[in-house]
Amino acid sequence: MVSKKRKTKKGNVLSVDLAAKKYEDNGIAFVSYRGRKITFPSTADLNLGGKPLAWDFAEALDRFCTNENVTVLMLDGPQGWKSPKTKIEHMRLCERVLNTPAKTGTIGNVKPSTTLRYIAFSINLFHILRVDYGWNLLTESWPDQSGKRWIVESFPSSAWRTLGLERLPAKSKTKTKQIKAWRRDLTMMTGYIIPNDISHDQLQAAVVLPAGQALAQGKVNRVVLSGMDPIVKRSGDVLEGWIVNPTLVGK
């Protein structure tokens, strides 16, 4: 059943640094559409535990978003597969532009092969949220479409760069003092109020929030889109899509 949309002009933003192995590895960040104080709900707060299941995660995310008037939901994972019609090999256009470590090929094909579970989980999550809960995949014409709930693909590693900051090292290579240093840099750049004691996953979820707020506020010049419009096949499969990054340049 499709969730009822709240008839509000502006909505809030939720970002998920997606993980497919354990719910507790998902970093979640929430901010109001004009707010500066970021909160970090846990998957336990969403009544989720055990091994992640796309159906359960989608239901919990939609419920939270409905309760908190979230109209921009950002997920750090692919929304679709590569179109066989593009000339780029082994990956989507957005992944080529941003040089993502995981490459989403044509349906069922990924590089490296160890990322198949994560990629399939992400695509399935996007699908369920779109088909069963009424979320919309972002298109280039988004500024002209009011009243929609957008589900948006993010890539935190590139968001650091588009904000003019050094990229946060990989989780396995990041020490606590580095997380504190990158948190400080993000707060200075954005004006966000972020708790001192946060995880790598939560910080990755937070860095893309300026893009979500720009979408919620209709500020076209504050986002950078990489890729192409998503293609929805008759089968229901989605191909390509945009990855959205924030920029503080422009009004």
Image (spheres, rainbow, N blue to C red):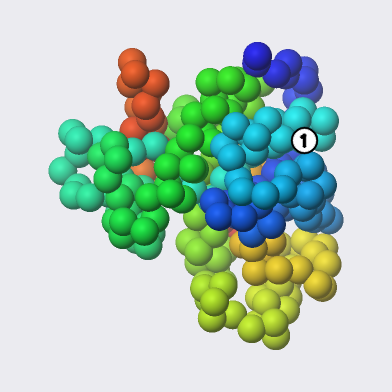
- Image location of residue 121, percent across then percent down: 48, 43
Closer to us: 22 or 216: 22
Q: Is residue 14 left or right of residue 79?
A: right
Q: Name which residue lies at 39% across and 37% down.
A: 80
Q: Residues within 10 Å of mark 1 (few under 14, many from 20)?
A: some
- Image location of residue 222, percent across then percent down: 58, 48
Q: Is residue 229 left or right of residue 147?
A: left
Closer to us: 196 or 184: 196
Q: Is residue 165 left or right of residue 182?
A: left
Name the outermost residue toward the front: 50
- Image location of residue 61, percent across then percent down: 69, 36
Q: Name which residue lies at 82% across and 30% down.
A: 67
Name the outermost residue toward the left: 87
- Image location of residue 86, percent across then percent down: 20, 39
Closer to us: 116 or 166: 116
Which image quadrant for residue 37? bottom right
Seen in the picture, residue 138 relative to 44 is either above or below; the reply is above
Residue type indicated by callout 1: Phe
Q: Name which residue lies at 31% across and 56% down.
A: 113
Q: Name which residue lies at 55% across and 55% down.
A: 21
Which image quadrant for residue 143? top right
Residue 175 in view, yes or no: yes
Q: Label 1 belongs to which residue?
A: 64
Residue 223 in view, yes or no: no
Q: Is residue 100 left or right of residue 7?
A: left
